[in-house]
Each structure stands twice: as C-alpha cells, then as structure tokens.
Amino acid sequence: MDKYVINGGRKLYGTLEISGAKNAAVAIIPAVLMVNGRCRLENLPQISDTDKLLQILTLMGAKVDFISPGTVDVDCSDVYLSDKIFPLTRQIRASYYLIGSMLGRFGKARTTMPGGCNFGVRPIDQHVKGMKALGVSVNIARGLIDAEAGNGLRGAHIYLDKVSVGATINVMIAAVMAKGRTVIENVAREPHIVDLANFLNSMGADIRGAGTDVIKVRGVESLHGGTYSLIPDQIEAGTYMAAVAGAGGSVRINNVIPRHLECISAKLREMGVEVEEYGDAITVRREGPLERVNVKTQPYPGFPTDMQPQITTVLCMAQGTSIVTEGVWDNRYKYVNELRKMGAEIQVSGKTAIIEGGRRLTGAPVAACDLRAGAAMVVAGLCAEGTTVVEDVVFIERGYEDMVGKLRSLGADIIAVSEPDPRMEFASRPRLIG
C-alpha cells in the first residue's frame, strides 16, 4: 500500500541519469532463455517487471547473479519448462515474449495470458499468426497458452496485419532458432526492437532490418553467451522532460539517445519549451507560458502512446485548447477522471481528448490507473498547488527506477509512504463461525 506524497509548485533544477530501457529489458530477458552459456546484461533497469522476469528464469532453472546495480549475470544452460512460473507471468504484459523464447529453446511453450496494465484489450492474434506460419500449433484455453512445433520451427514469409510491437518481438525471437529464412513484413520499428535484435545478433543470431518495415532472420543452431548493455529508456526520459515542461525549471538529462526523443522534443518546442541536444544528453528548460498543441500518438517514429498521459497532463497548463488523439490503444484515458479531481477540464470522446488549458491544477488524492498514467499523476502533482497523494504506485514502480529519488535530486518535494494494507489486516483477524 505504498503511495507518493507530493507538495507541488516547485520548479525543477539539476541533473539526472536515465536508466536502461524498460521495454528493451522485458524483451531481452525472455530472449536470454535461448542462450547456451552466461549472459551479462548491463544498464538493466531496477524495476519490478525486470525483477519478476528474472524470478521467472530462476524458477525455470536459470542461475541469476546480481553483480552490481544494473548488472546481472544469467546462465540458462540447465533450464526447463515449469508451471511454477504462472503466478508471475499473470502479473506482467511481457510474459508473452516467453512464447517465442520457449519455442526457440524447447520446441514448445506453456505460459499464461499476459497481465500488467489494463488500458485496453491485448489481443495476441498477430503473435499466433506468426507462430503458426513458423510451424507451431497454438491452443489457448482457461487463460493458458500451449504451443508446440512438432516438426521443429521452420522459416516463413509473414505479413503482420497491423503494426504490433509485441508480435514483432515475439515472432523475431522464435525465428532466430527456426530452420531457414524468415521474412517478417509490416513490423514495428521502435528503438527497443532494434536493441533486442542487436542483443540477439551479439549472441550469434542473424537478424537484418530491425528498425525498418521488414525484418529478415536466418535461423541458427544455437546462441552463445556474452555481454550486452541496454539502450537508455526513451519513455523515462520523456516523462522527466514532461515534468520540467509542466513544473518549469531547467534540467540536464544524461544517458539518452536524442534521436529517440525527437518526436517528444519537437512537441515540447512547439509548446514553448527549450530543448538542447548533445551527444548523449539533453537540457530541458521552461520559464515562460506553455502554448497549446495537438498531439496524435502513432507507432515509432511518431509520438509514443506511452507518453500520451504525461503530455496530456502538461497540456492542462497550456494556454488555449489542445486536442490529443490516441492512435494505438482503444481505451487509454482512464486517468482523465483522476486529473479532473485536480481541476483539469478534459472531455473525452472515443480516442480523442479535448483539453481546456490555462488552469492551475490543485492537489488531491489520486490513483495510478496503470504505469504511464501513474507517471502522469506524479507530473500533475509536481505542477499542482498544494498536496497530491498518488496511490497504487506499484504500477509506477513496474517501469520507473527510483522515481522519488531522482525527482528529489531536482528539488521536488516528494516522498514515498508505506502503509499497511487494510485488506490484509482484516484477513489476518480471527473469525467467529456459527
């Protein structure tokens, strides 16, 4: 029952370091399952999703050694399938990447439907389509996914019906161990897909075209161990950029790839925020008023859907009417009701939100509906007058490493508070029967 207490109205100043990419980590850790030998992963974000994935590998017989903060050794030489992983796989969205890696390692897979944040349906039809093309039979029943390549994985030509990050990753992982050549068209192009391909190639895979519309994979017999450092987190960096834009101030953000942030930087500049780029850092500065803009989320290199709640929150402070259109998910505006508690004027119709800006938010008790919505509540609390209490921060800690500590280093008045769960207290009480 942890929560964050924020006293808003302070501008942010200083320097912070961005952690490794959460979306890369949750794809690369399952892919380690296919590697014979030791893998050392560096710049790994210390978040609950990566912890759970490493626990899953441990339950499957992997040896996991934490070398230092952000560095872990994983040896999957003696792994095996196990139903013990199900309670954990039900808690995270990235659990479906185990389908591709299990098939590559064992020729069969058994896991659960994905969990994680609830902001729209998560169909895996494109995952299944890709797996079937690779010679896999798939059965989904009672929340479990059973898949098997009875005659082995075989290369195929696959066209995804829609651009899907998850399907692109899952099919690419499975194709690494398929016999022959696999061509996957209409794929997603996000930076973490490129990072996954680079990781697999460094372990002996043969993947070409990641970052374009077509990925070509020539299957290999096995993957060997090695060392790999993950890219910085594009969305973590974007979230702190939004925080500075909303609260004001000047912050240098280190350990970033500015090219990955161009779509975010462009919108902030349009709003009147100064963004200066360096080799592996950016400075974000905002002193004057914010201007209205229109935003539409799209697959990379468009504006990321994972930044939609944060930019919507900042637009509450902008002068005039802004329009945000969600182009990826069907239902990602649940957090709007929380912003309304703080005085935001937002109208939602389908995939479109109309924000009447120019009003100062006021502190209130709010909840994190999901990972990025939770980050948006923190941004709102930093911008608001008075005290904001953000509950259900377990969602935030799925994807942000030490958010409280990083914000405090910039001068924010934010603390994490732990309270006992009253449901557990009730459950522990003796009950009278009869």
Image (cartoon, rainbow, N blue to C red):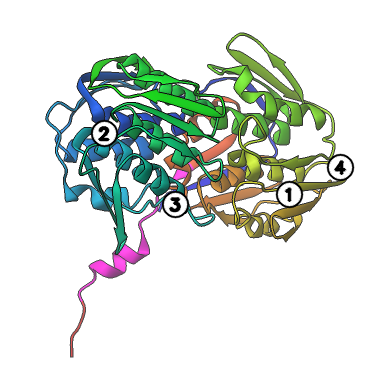
Residue 160 image offset from top left, x and y in percent: 51, 42
Give the residue pinned by disc 3: 125
Q: CA distance from mark 4 to mark 3?
A: 42 Å
Tags 1 and 3 touching, CB below 8 Å: no
Q: Residue at x 64, y 29 (%)?
A: 301
Give the residue pinned by disc 1: 361
Residue 226 lies within the magenta run = no
Q: Amino acid at mark 1?
A: Leu
Residue 125 image offset from top left, x and y in percent: 44, 52
**Which label number is shown at residue 319?**
4
Q: CA distance from mark 1 to mark 2?
A: 51 Å
Q: Residue at x 35, y 50 (%)?
A: 91
Q: CA distance from mark 2 to mark 3?
A: 19 Å
**Which label number is shown at residue 104?**
2
Residue 407 image offset from top left, x and y in percent: 56, 31
Secondary structure beneath dot 3 equals helix
Q: Amino acid at mark 4?
A: Gln
Q: Nearer the viewer, residue 34 or 289?
A: 34
Residue 418 lies within the magenta run = yes
Against 260, residue 120 (above or below) is below
Camera-near label (1 vs 3) is 3
Q: Is residue 147 left or right of residue 353?
A: left
Q: Is residue 308 visible?
A: yes
Mark 1 / mark 2, whichever is N-terminal: 2
Mark 1 / mark 3, whichever is N-terminal: 3
Q: Is residue 401 visible?
A: no
Q: Amino acid at mark 2?
A: Gly
